[in-house]
Amino acid sequence: MPRALILGGTGLIGRAAARRLRSSGWTVEAPGREVDREDPAAIARALGDGADLLVDCLCYTAAHARTLLPLRRNATSTVMISAKAVYADSEGRHVNSDEPPRFAGPVAEDQPTVAPGDGDYQTREGYGANKVAAEHVLLDSGLPITVLRPSKVHGEGNKRPLEWYFVQRILAKHPVVLLASRGEGADHPSATANIAALIETVAGKPGTRVLNAADPDAPNGLEISRIIARALGHEWREVLLDHDKLGRHPWHRVPPFVLDTSAATALGHVPAGDYATTVGPVVAALAGRPAPSADATRTAAR
């Protein structure tokens, strides 16, 4: 049986990857806090004699990436989880800049990125720069490394599910939903199930590459509000506002930010499902539980 080690295996993406791989016959070790990501020796012990796949969900800086270099020679294939926050438009704007980026269309992997940097990766300006620096260390090593760049991640077990924005209004039986910018704002969703499916794909095809990791569709705010309402059997009147002062929702990104996923498709990736399919279990779970706590997470957008 092939063996996989997932660093950050108890996180949102790590858990989904572990489920997917185990269902496909892999032996998966997904340690949590018992393996300190800052301790190279602890990671080396976890890797042991080697693995067919090493997945790092906790690589945020160049220093993190450098701790992997001595270990990845013992892994047939390695996957590093990056983020769409690395992309910059022609004016250098990115998802964490004060002014939103403007792209001509879906963003492909050859889109320029922000400059690599160090400093605090938990800040808005530092997050993308540190991710780029980590990517460079790994891709320049010449070893079989796949960098995945997800967008707005959603999935079962999320402590701060974005879908709660609409679910709570549905549970309160709101007859009306207000949508800023006529609901046309969009921020490409990335289901953990689809990221996990792509991890499995690249595990069988080791190589040095960068791939966008997002859902096969990119619904806008209006479409997402309808998908969630339909999943819970709710009907409401849609008020499409021409401005963005009211009705701002978690996917309200204007201009829209959509990733081009054709490179993953060309590699043989088959998504687990579209947004409506993959978000269904999340919405059902949210409808049966109280509001999620305001978990203290990083302020940088992914």
Image (spheres, rainbow, N blue to C red):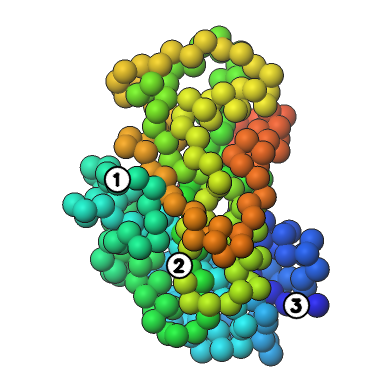
Looking at the image, which residue is at 26% across and 52% down?
89
Q: Which residue is mark 2?
A: 210
Q: Which residue is mark 3?
A: 2
Circle on res. 104: 1
Residue 249, by quadrant, is: top left
- Sequence-wise, the earlier of marks 2 and 3 is 3
Q: Is residue 3 left or right of residue 211?
A: right
Q: Is residue 143 left or right of residue 107?
A: right
Is residue 11 visible in the rendered image? The answer is: no
- Sequence-wise, the earlier of marks 2 and 1 is 1
Residue 174, by quadrant, is: top right
* Residue 259 coordinates in the image, percent (x, y): 43, 50
> How far is the residue under mark 3 from the one under mark 1?
42 Å
> How far is the residue under mark 2 from the one under mark 3?
23 Å
Q: Callout 2, which amino acid?
A: Val
**Picture layout, residue 17 above or below residue 215:** below
Is residue 262 visible in the rendered image? The answer is: yes
Q: Callout 1, which amino acid?
A: Ala
- Sequence-wise, the earlier of marks 3 and 1 is 3
> How far is the residue under mark 2 from the one under mark 1?
20 Å
Under circle 3, the secondary element is loop
Answer few, some or many: residues within 10 Å of disc 1's Cα (few below 14, many 20 plus, some between 14 and 19).
few
Q: Nearer the viewer, mark 3 or mark 1?
A: 1
Which of 122 and 205 lies nearest the eye of the viewer?
205
The N terminus lies in quadrant:
bottom right
Q: Callout 3, which amino acid?
A: Pro
* Residue 239 coordinates in the image, percent (x, y): 43, 13
Looking at the image, which residue is at 61% across and 74% down?
205
Q: Is residue 146 left or right of residue 181?
A: right
* Residue 200 coordinates in the image, percent (x, y): 66, 65
